[in-house]
Amino acid sequence: MTRVAAIDCGTNSIRLLVAEADAAGRLTDIDRQMRVVRLGQDVDARGAFVPEALLRTRTALEEYAQIIRDNGATAIRMVATSATRDAENRDEFFYMTQEVLGDIVAGAKAEVITGDEEARLSFAGAVGDLSTDTDPVLVVDLGGGSTELVLGSGGVVAAAKSSNIGCVRVTERCLPSDPPTADEIDAAERFIAERLAVALETVPVEQTRSWVGVAGTMTTIAAIALGLDEYQADRIHLSRIPFDQLNEVCDRLIGMSRKDRAALGPMHPGRVDVIGGGALITRTLARILSERAGVDELVVSEHDILDGIAASIVRR
């Protein structure tokens, strides 16, 4: 048995999976953790990480390092995505990650992956629990700074594209008011449509038979649609949300004040101010998939890029 540690550092959150791999490469969860650190704070506007965001990320990573030690993981892969691709001072981030992780495994540090590689890792993680009679599957990983669209069948990717839209980026660029105004929502919808149009030139979503959504925006929307009083990953995983219910939840989240969002039981405090932007992206995708592919529900998975990263360590 081999224990591995996968870390996904995105624009909004940093997450850890410690898993045990058997001789066939099958993974069993040992520990999962998530911290909202908002590494991508103001990166869209400034083009660089702000010091307080790097400090928050370091604090969380030091906590993860201790968890990795305590669980005896011997291999680490840390992946950084949208915000790190965009930040001019990313070398500061890399140095910090090597300082923290290098004490566990020599030379360990974060690596930046392309949007397309991010998409493929997300697909690998998301489809593991799905039966092949749902193919072709469109996996959408809606993050803080980017959204990945991946179409595939039988666990094999046919087309993938990353778009520079995410809940943090849309909120910072288009939705400054609390709650957002009608004009701000219109501007956000135009921005989202423009960015998605580029991805749709590469990914033939009209072939989609099943739509699978991963990451915090999607899982939180599912929790609200399911009427949960608190976040319950086992209830959310592989839940099916019909589009009429999905759109109702998205409409509510988009129009709510931050105070009202914070009062929702399943809502993580770190998502309160940005989930409206994520709901706008989700609602736009639902409309596109309804019109182009006749899809009428969203399947939500708790397994995502983090699981894909862990599997990639085992395959090395």
Image (cartoon, grey):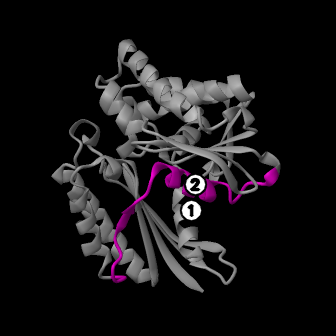
Left-right relation of 251 to 34? right
- At label 1, counting other C-alpha atoms closer than 10 Å, the crowd grade (few under 14, some 14-19, many 20 or more) is many
Q: Is residue 307 above or below residue 102?
A: above
Q: What residue is drawn where x is 54% and y is 43%?
A: 161
Residue 95 magenta-drawn?
Answer: no
Q: What residue is drawn where x is 31% and y is 46%?
A: 86
The amino acid sitting under disc 2 is Arg
Residue nearer the viewer, 238 or 282: 282
Q: Is residue 186 above or below residue 136?
A: above
Q: Are marks 2 and 1 in contact (CB under 8 Å)?
A: yes
Assign a secondary structure to mark 2: helix
- At label 2, counting other C-alpha atoms closer than 10 Å, the crowd grade (few under 14, some 14-19, many 20 or more) is many
Mark 2 or mark 1: which comes first in sequence?
A: 2
Residue 259 in percent (x, y) is at 34, 31
Q: What residue is drawn where x is 45% and y is 20%?
A: 190
Residue 107 magenta-drawn?
Answer: yes
Q: In this picture, which residue range is highlighted in magenta?
A: 104-132
The amino acid sitting under disc 1 is Gly
Left-right relation of 157 to 42? right
Q: Say which residue label 1 marks.
A: 308
Residue extending furthest toward the front: 201
- The span from disc 2 to disc 1 (Cα, nearest Å) is 8 Å
Q: Say how many tags the image has.
A: 2
Left-right relation of 72 to 223? left
Residue nearer the viewer, 269 or 41: 41
Q: What is the number of the mark on residue 120?
A: 2
Quarter of the figure with residue 28: bottom right
The image quadrant where one finds the C terminus is: bottom right
Residue 160 in percent (x, y) is at 59, 45
Assign a secondary structure to mark 1: helix
